[in-house]
């Protein structure tokens, strides 16, 4: 039986999607903590293992939209199950990998599966609830990703450090298999897409000026966030004066802010996502600029890092909901591809942020990170205001 989008409660299938996304997020972020172990075990330079992070991000950014277009005509429950199977396969390659080439291949496969699964999970979740719960449903799906940064990645790093990095991938495989079985049981059959886009239709998504504005705001917002976040640990150590253990605690506090912000952002974005986005970008920029003046104060830094996590990821539900809605309005059937492209935009922002951060460190200093990040978020704010003025009548 096909479940209609009239449920006023959160269906159990959405929680199952969240469970699965937690596994994807853990697979993405855990490798950072395993790089030294992998480099030592495979006898390769640490710089080579850094490609494991890059390949996963490229898998999401390129493979997500590409495979979303190629699979647009497949019924979504079947597609989600098949995507989970490919994710399991990719992690099995990592588990049995004996050289860096096999690991890199596994990261491309699992990254593409991540982008594809998340794009359709968002659409499925939003279709299963009433209109005034769509952003909340999206935030719940993304919460699996957020919680994985706080719980999954540290736990996976612990397993890899104490029992071998390959066993971390084994744990991810087991988690994904449990999610696959659960999703197969609780997720109703979904309506077969009636206006699914094909590969050659991807450029049509980018022809929508409304969608482009939101995508650009996403890129600028997360460029600004990761200008600072990429070098947050050196800032906390060299400027604020935190010890190694204290830095881990501050990063945990950031993760708590991320998780809370994602949930709260979903509730705030249910009715007026465009307006919510403007306020989130505004306070996001303010927090970054304030950090520039208090980097030597531990209490202020802790408080502002918590707020930064909240504001930086509180906009995720609004961005995702707006991209899907605006794309479907201009081109029916394009919601899945638009969702995947928005995830790609986030990863582009992450990449640009780390690159810009490196330039700032070399030419200026760590002290410049917060205000440079704030400038990028200000651009996102201007784009958010532009989007609000174009859509405020609809949201009323």
Image (cartoon, rainbow, N blue to C red):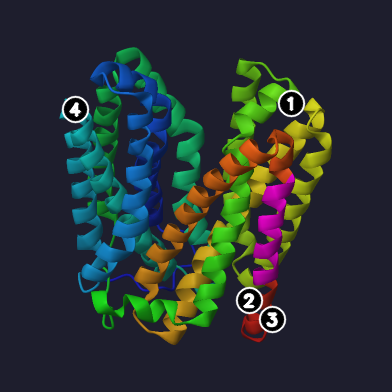
Residue 260 visible to the viewer:
no
Residue receiving disc 3: 389
> Which quarter of the rendered picture does the C terminus lie within?
bottom right
Query: Are dots 1 and 2 in contact, CB under 8 Å?
Result: no
Q: Which of the two labelled residues, at mark 1 and mark 2, occupies the earlier sequence position?
A: 1
Q: Which residue is mark 1?
A: 239
Real-space Cα separation, disc 3 to disc 1, in angstroms: 41 Å
Disc 3 or disc 4, which is closer to the eye? 4
The secondary structure type at the circle numbered 2 is helix
Residue 305 placement (x, y as % from top left): 70, 38
Tag on residue 99? 4
Q: Residues within 10 Å of mark 3 (few under 14, many from 20)?
A: few
Query: Which residue is identified by label 2?
Result: 387
Q: Earlier in the sequence, mark 4 or mark 1?
A: 4
* Precedes in sequence: disc 2 or disc 4: 4
Left or right side of 221 for 96: left
Q: Nearer the viewer, mark 1 or mark 2?
A: 1
Give, as a single range, the part of the protein colored magenta.
Answer: 371-384
């Amino acid at each position: 039986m096909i479940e209609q989008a009239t449920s006023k409660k959160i269906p159990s299938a959405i929680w199952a999607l969240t469970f699965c996304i937690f596994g994807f997020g853990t697979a993405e972020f855990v490798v950072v903590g395993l790089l030294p172990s992998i480099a030592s075990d495979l006898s390769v330079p640490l710089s080579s293992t850094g490609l494991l992070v890059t390949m996963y991000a490229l898998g999401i950014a390129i493979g997500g939209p590409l495979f979303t277009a190629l699979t647009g005509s497949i019924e979504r429950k079947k597609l989600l199950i098949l995507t989970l199977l490919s994710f399991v396969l990719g992690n099995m390659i990592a588990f049995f990998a004996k050289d860096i080439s096999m690991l890199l291949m596994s990261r491309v496969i699992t990254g593409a599966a991540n982008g594809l699964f998340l794009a359709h999970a968002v659409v499925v979740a939003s279709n299963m609830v009433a209109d005034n719960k769509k952003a909340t449903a999206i935030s719940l799906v993304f919460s699996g990703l957020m919680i994985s940064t706080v719980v999954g990645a540290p736990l996976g790093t612990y397993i890899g450090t104490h029992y071998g990095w390959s066993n971390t991938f084994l744990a991810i495989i087991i988690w994904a298999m449990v999610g696959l079985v659960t999703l197969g049981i609780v997720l109703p059959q979904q309506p077969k897409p009636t206006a699914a886009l094909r590969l050659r239709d991807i450029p049509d998504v980018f022809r929508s000026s409304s969608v482009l504005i939101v995508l650009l705001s996403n890129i600028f917002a997360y460029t600004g966030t990761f200008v600072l976040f990429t070098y947050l640990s050196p800032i906390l150590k060299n400027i604020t004066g935190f010890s190694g253990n204290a830095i881990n605690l501050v990063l945990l506090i950031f993760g708590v802010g991320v998780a809370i912000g994602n949930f709260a952002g979903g509730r705030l974005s249910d009715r007026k996502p465009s307006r919510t986005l403007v306020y989130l970008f505004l306070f996001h920029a303010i927090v970054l600029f304030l950090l520039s003046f208090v980097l030597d104060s531990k209490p202020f830094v802790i408080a502002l890092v918590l707020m930064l996590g909240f504001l930086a990821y509180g906009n995720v539900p609004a961005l995702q909901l707006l991209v899907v809605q605006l794309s479907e309005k201009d081109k029916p059937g394009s919601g899945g591809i638009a969702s995947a492209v928005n995830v790609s935009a986030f990863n582009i922002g992450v990449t640009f942020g780390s690159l810009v951060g490196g330039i700032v460190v070399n030419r200026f200093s760590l002290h410049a990170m917060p205000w440079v990040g704030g400038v990028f978020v200000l651009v996102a704010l201007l784009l958010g205001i532009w989007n609000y003025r174009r859509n405020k009548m609809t949201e009323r």
